[in-house]
Image (tube, rainbow, N blue to C red):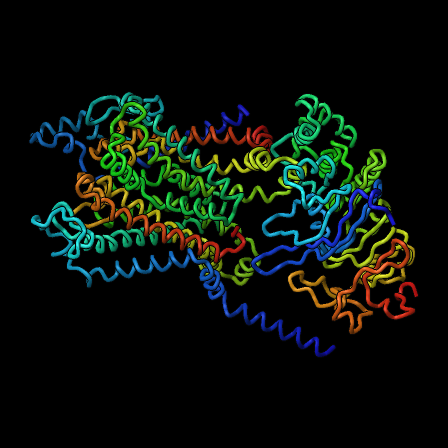
Amino acid sequence: MSKNVTTINDTGSALKKRKKISRSSEIWMRMKSKKSAMIGLIIFSLLILVALSAGFLVDYQDDVVTPNIPERLQGPSMEHPFGTDSIGRDIMSRMIYGARISLGVAFAAVIFQVIVGTLIGAISGFYGGKVDDILMRINDVFASIPNLLLAITIATALGHSIINMIIAIGIAGTPSLVRIVRATVMSVKDQEFVEAGKALGGNDMQIIVSHLIPNCIAPIIVQGTLKIATAILATSSLSFLGIGIKPPTPEWGNMLSGGREFLRNAPYITVIPGLAIVTTILSINLMGDGLRDALDPKLKQ
Amino acid sequence: MSRYIFRRVLQLIPVILGASAIIFFILSYSNQDPVMMLLAGTDPTLEQIEMTRHQLGLDRPIWIQFFSYMGGLVRGDLGVSYSTGREVFKEYMLRFPATLKLAFWALFVSVLISIPIGIVSAIKQYSWFDNFGMTFAMLGVATPNFWLGLMLIILFSVQLGWLPAGGYGGLKFLILPAITLGTGQAGLATRMTRSSMLEVIRQDYIRTARAKGLSEKVVIIKHALKNALIPIVTVLGVQFGHALGGAMITETIFSWPGVGRLMIDGINKYDRPVVIGCVIMLCIMVSVVNLAVDILYAYLDPRIKAGYSK
Amino acid sequence: MNTKNDLILDINNLVVHYETVEGTVQAVNGIDIQVPHKHTLGIVGETGAGKTTTALSILRLIPDPPGIIKGGEIFLEGEDILKISEKKMRKIRGRDVAMIFQDPMTSLNPVHTVGAQIAEVVQLHEGLSRSEAIKRAGETLEMVGIPAERSTEYPHQFSGGMKQRVIIAIALACNPKLLIADEPTTALDVTIQAQALELMKDLRNRLGMSMIMITHDLGIVAEVCDDVAVLYAGRIVESGTVREVFKSTMHPYTEGLFNSLPVINDKGARIKPIPGLMPDPIELPEGCAFHPRCPYAFDKCTKETPELRYFGETHGVACHAYDQTGFKLKRRG
C-alpha cells in the first residue's frame, strides 16, 4: 500500500515538473508536428533573411534604381535570373530590396496595430461602462469602412512616403485587433487573480499591464501574424493602384504594376512579383494557422 | 420583425454619419490642395486661384465646411464634384449598374465554387479532395486580386485571345472580372463552408437524421447545410457588400466603369466630394446587405427569428 | 433457449474498434446478444463500456472514420445486416429498427418544425404523400401526448421532456419492430424521467415491439426489461433474465454495481463503490479487463480472458472464479 502511495506522489510531482518545463516548448512541439506550419515558418524565415541581408546582396544605387536602357526587357537568363524591367534594371535585385520594403512596412504597420489596438482594447475592456461605449462606437465607425478603402484615404491625405504607408495600413487594421483584445480582457477581468491583484492594492495600469495583457498574448500573436499577411497585401494593393509606394523605390506591388504594359512581350515582369506575394502570404497564413492550433488546441478541428 | 428592421435602419444613421466625418477630416488634412490640382497645367493667377477656392467653398473654416456638407448629406445631397462640376449622386448612379452587375456575378462565381468544395471537403475530411480543396482555398486567400486578374489576362487575352482584356459590354467582357473577384472571395468562403459543415455534421441531430434512414444526400443538404449556412451567408454577405461598394482593384485592371474606378479617380484628383460620396454610398451598401443578411438569418434559423420579435 | 426464428436480433461475436491517432480504442470486443420478439433487453454498464457503440452498430451508424466494425454478425430477423448494401440498410433504419438518442436537447434539428421531422420519416418509408405524412405526424404526436397543433412549432419551443417525446414520436412513427433506447432519460429531470419511461413502456406494449434499453440505471432495468446484459470494457460479463441477474448475481462487477446503490430500507448500510476506474479502452489490461478492480481476482484472471459460461439455460457469466468449486460472491454468501 505504502509503495502505491509513493508511486502516485512521484507521478504527481513529475507531472507538475513537466508542466513547468513550459507551455512554450509544448506549443513548439505542437507546432512542429504540423508540417504545413513548419513549411510556412521556414519559407517566411528565409524571406526575412533575404530582406535583412538585402544591403549585402545587392547595391541599391547600381542594381536597384539606376536605369540601364540597353539591357531593357530582357527575359530571364543566367545574368538576370528574373530578367530586366522596362528600363533595364535587374528584377531579382529589385525583388530582394522589395522584400525589405514590403516586409518592413507590413511589420511596422502590425507593430503599430498591436500597440494601439492592445491599449485601446485593454482600456475599453477593463473599464467597461461609458469609456467602453464611447471607444467601441468610434471603433465600430472605423470598422465600418473597408480596410483597403480606409488605408487608401489615409494614404492619399498623408502623401506617398513609407512612413505614411505604415500609418495608413496601421490605422486601417487596428479596429479588429481592438475587438479581439477587448473580448479577451473582458473574459479574464473578473477572474480571481485579477481580483487578487486589486486586493493587493495594484493600480489599474499595473493590473492591465501585469495581469490582463499577458492573457491576451496568444490571440494577439495569432492575429498579429495573420495581419502581417493582410498588411503585405494592402501595401502591394495600394502601390499597384499608384497610391502607395512610388517607383523607383522597389515594392512588389508597384513592380507588378510597372509590368502591365508589357504583358505580351515580358509577362515575367508581372508574374514574378506576384508569385513572391502569393508565396509570402501563403507562408504567413500557414504559419498563423499552425500557431493558432498550437496555442489553442481546443479550437482545432 | 418590421420593428427590428426599423430599429436596424435607425442604428445605421450614426454609423454612416460617423464614417463620413472620418473620411471628411482625413481628406481635409491632406497637404494637397484640390484647387491647385484642378487648375494644374493652366498656369493660374493668384486671383484665379482665390476665385476657384471661393467657388468651391474651400475658403471657409473647416468646421463650417463640415457642417454645410453634413447638412447637405442629411437632405440627400452628396455635393458636386470638384473636377467635373457634376452632382456626385448622379455620377454615382451612372456607374452603379456596372458595379452591381460585377458584384452579382462575382458572388455567383464564389458561391458556385465555395459551397460545393466546402461541403465535400467537410464530408471527406482529410481525404485527397479535402487537401485539394483547402490548398485551393489557401491559394485563393493568398493571391492578390490584381495579380490574379493580370494572370487571367495574360492567359485568356494575350496568349489564347479568347476574351477581351478589359472594357464593358456583353458577357465576354464580364467573365474575367467576375472570375477574378469571385475566386478571391471564394477562398475565404470555402474555408468557412468547410469549418461550419464540420461543426454541424458532428451534431446529434445529424445522427438522428441518419437513423431515420435518409440518404446521405438528404442528410447533408436538408439537415446539415441549412444549419451550417449562417456563417457562410455572413461571409458571402460581407464580400458582396464590399463588392457593391466598388471593387477598386478589379475594376481598375479590367477598365470596368463602376464606382470603384470613380472612387480611385476621385482619390487621384483629390476630389473630396466624390470620394466622400463614394464612401458614404459604400457604407450604405454594406449596411443594407448586412441588414438583408440578418433578415435572411431569420428564415434560416427559427430561433433567431424568435429573437428578433422580442 | 430461444430458437433462431424467435429472435428479432441475434448478434454474434461483434467487435468494433475506433482507430484514432492516440491508438486503437477497443470499444466492443466480441459481444453476443439475442433479443426475442416482444422482449426487452437491458444493456447495463458504465460510460465507455461500449453500450452506445453496440447500439449504433445495429443501425450501422458507427462514425467511420474512426470507427470500424472489425468482425461479427448482426442478424436482424435472420438477415446479416453487416453484409447488405447501404441502400438496403437505409430501408431498415427508421422503419424496422429505430433509435431514441440520449440527449433530447441536441437530437432534434433546430431549423425544421417537429412535424416536418416526424413526417419526413413516414414519407420516406411508407410512401405517403406530403399531406398524409403531416397528418400522420400529428397523430403520432398525439400518441406521445403532445397536441397535434404543435407540429408546426420548432424544437426550441419545447421543453426537454417534450423534446424527448418528439424524439420518441419520430422513432415510433413507422411502427418499428425493434426500438433501441440509448439512455433515453439520463438528460431529463427525475419527475420527467418517470413519465418518459412510463410512456415508452406503454407504447412498447401497445405496439408489440422488441426493445433494447441502454442505461446505467439498474432501477430502469428492473422496471422495464425482461432480460439484461451487463457490459464491461466492451464485453458481456453477465447476462440472463432480470430475475436471474438481480436475484442470483454471479459476476463480481455486477455485484459491485449493486453495492454502489444506496439502500433505502437500510439507512445504516454503507454504499460500497467499486474501487478504481474503468480501464482505458486503448490499453485494456491483460486477461479479464475487470481484474485490477476485482476483489476476487487471482492469477488466472491476469492472464486469460474469461469466456461467457452458462449456468442454467439463460444465465451466463464470464468469470474465472467459478473454476473454483463452491465459489460464491460475498453478497450471496
- Which residue is pictured at 82% across the width and 67% down the height? C320
Q: Is residue A127 visible?
A: no
- Quadrant in the rendering for residue C158: top right
Apparent side of residue A35 relative to residue C151 in the rendered image (left or right): left
Q: Nearer the viewer, residue B307 or C172?
A: C172
User: On the rendered structure, is A18 left or right of B168?
Assistant: right
Q: Residue at x 29, y 31 (%)?
A: B260
- Of residue C150 and residue C253, the one placed in the foreground of this image is C253
Q: Is residue A79 above or below residue A148?
A: below
The answer to whether residue B79 is visible is yes
Q: Position of residue C28 (x, y in %)?
A: 70, 55
Give the vertical position of B92 relative to A170 (above or below): above
Q: Nearer the viewer, residue C309 or A55?
A: C309
Q: Is residue A251 above or below residue C267?
A: above
Q: At x 67% / y 62%, what residue is drawn?
A: C280
Image check: B180 left or right of B202? left
Residue A259 rendering spot, x and y as whole percentages:
19, 42
Vertical relation: A180 (above or below) C140: below
